[in-house]
Image (cartoon, rainbow, N blue to C red):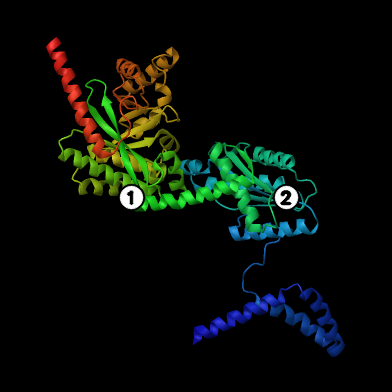
Amino acid sequence: MKARMLAGLIRRRGRLSKWLHGAHMLAFLPALTLAGFWIGGEMALIAIALGLPALYALSSDGTTGPLDPDRPLPDLVDGAAASELADQMLARAGSSNLATACFMLEAEGLDSIRRRVGDDTVQDLRNMLLRRLRALMRRGDCAARIGDSRYLVLLGPSLRLDLEALLTLADRMQRALEEPVESDVGTHYLSVAVGFCGSSRLPGTPDGAQFVEAAQTALAEALSNSPSAIRAWSDSMRAERRARKSLLAEVERALAKGQIQPWFQPQLCTSTGRISGVEALARWLHPERGIVPPMEFLNALEESGQLDRLSEVMLQHSLTALRSWDAAGIEIPRVSVNFSDVELRSPQLVERIKWELDRFNLPASRLGVEVLETVIAESPEGVVAKNITGLSRLGCQVDLDDFGTGHASITALRRFTVHRLKIDRSFVTRVDRDEEQRRMLAAVLGLADRLGLETVAEGVESVSEHALLAQLGCDHVQGFGIARPMPPDQLSTWARAHAERVHAAQQIGRSAG
């Protein structure tokens, strides 16, 4: 009963507040004041003067009114508020037969700064970027932050907002925000992607939500191309956006139905020729499209926050395959699984992997953990570092993937207890024909040898590359020139045939000796 009475009071209070704050009160208040003076004289005026403020205070529900582009905006707005502001700008521009535009800007690099120096510095950077952005605005424009690293700009109604003018303005915003920022912990460099849409480019009579979505679509296109890209919305982006959403839903279903599974690519020891391990690589076995390569669906899984689930699937299938090879008498010393920075931030990662190894009754030495060099370079401290160290102490072998493409220091290599360097294929391609490439590869291999680290060369595609890598002292090789990724049963057949070839070659060597 009390709850119903309270709800009724709140509803009545809300209706009273809405009525008192309505636009009609601009005409009603002067009339009320005049009528009060005529009817009751000075005492009535005093009653009105004292009673109305009290009535407004009583009716106030503590919430702010609708956002107004003419008034200072809060620093952070949500999606609904952004759509509301865009609606107002579109209405103003339409009533004056003028144009407006919506910009979305994304500051890239804040996550890596946060991992290095903490949240306080990043918040200072966010505020600095917003101040810079607002300093560029004209009277009637508005700017606010709409996410952790995303900013919204709405232009006031203008006569000339063609594509050239909007591109010039986008470039000006980008250059202002990309200026280096000084803080107590050093100088920070950010890249800023920009997507925008002019109101004249949208067909029909769009609302604010469609206006904001168009700018966000253009920003997504900019982010997918390169750092510091600028993109204007076009109608073709709408179809691409729908296709991306469709892929997102489809890949989530595929993961749930078990259509995404690991295929395995062998790694060979250059000294013995035997299989020294396999790398698990995700493949989508689509019922209609066949085998879908990872580049087409990994970004969709990351966007939907499903990389953790993919990691679980890859790990379980890989350990299952390892047990089946053991049961069949096929010697596969180790299976290596890729772990993204998202997965490596999980505080439960080490315990989860330990539990999985115990469940399959496998020693940790049979599992390789592949970590991108960029992850180590950007995460010298924190959860990622603790997880990598914890996995190494557990007994897992840590491989530094794509070595040579990031900025990991030698100190970081030692602190993270890396066991092997996976040399990126860019160092391997044409190494048998390019002398400069050969010297560069020899320098990398020499560095690894001095640090006591094993090496794996990726992307080996010819017999001559394989032979030269062995001569230069690379420990292991992997690539299409040796074998393509294959499902577990095909790998069993390939491994048996390869073991027979190695055995036959050894017998020939002994008889020749």
What residue is disc 1 on? 258
**Three-letter residue code for mark 1:** Gly
Q: Is residue 397 above or below residue 54?
A: above
Which image quadrant for residue 204? bottom right
Secondary structure beneath label 2: helix
State the residue at coordinates (23%, 37%): 366
State the residue at coordinates (57%, 38%): 190
**Three-letter residue code for mark 2:** Ser
* Other-residue count near label 1 (Cα within 10 Å), few / some / many at <14 / 14–19 / ≥20: few
Question: Between residues 162 and 375, which one lies in front from this camera angle?
Answer: 162
Marks 2 and 1, how far apart in space? 46 Å
The disc at residue 333 is none
Tell me residue 183's x, y (percent). 57, 40
Which image quadrant for residue 136? top right
User: Is residue 57 visible in this depiction of the protein?
Assistant: no
Q: Is residue 328 above or below residue 349?
A: above
State the residue at coordinates (80%, 55%): 97
Question: Between residues 113 and 284, which one lies in front from this camera angle?
Answer: 284
User: Is residue 146 visible in this depiction of the protein?
Assistant: yes
Instruction: Pick out the residue farthest to the front.
Output: 288
Left-right relation of 52 to 288: right
What residue is disc 2 on? 200
Q: Is residue 212 above or below residue 344?
A: below
Instruction: Pick out the residue farthest to the top.
Output: 513
Is there a contact, CB below 8 Å, between mark 2 and mark 1? Answer: no
Left-right relation of 20 to 507: right
Q: Earlier in the sequence, mark 2 or mark 1?
A: 2
Question: Which quadrant is home to the C terminus?
Answer: top left
Tell me residue 414's x, y (percent). 34, 31
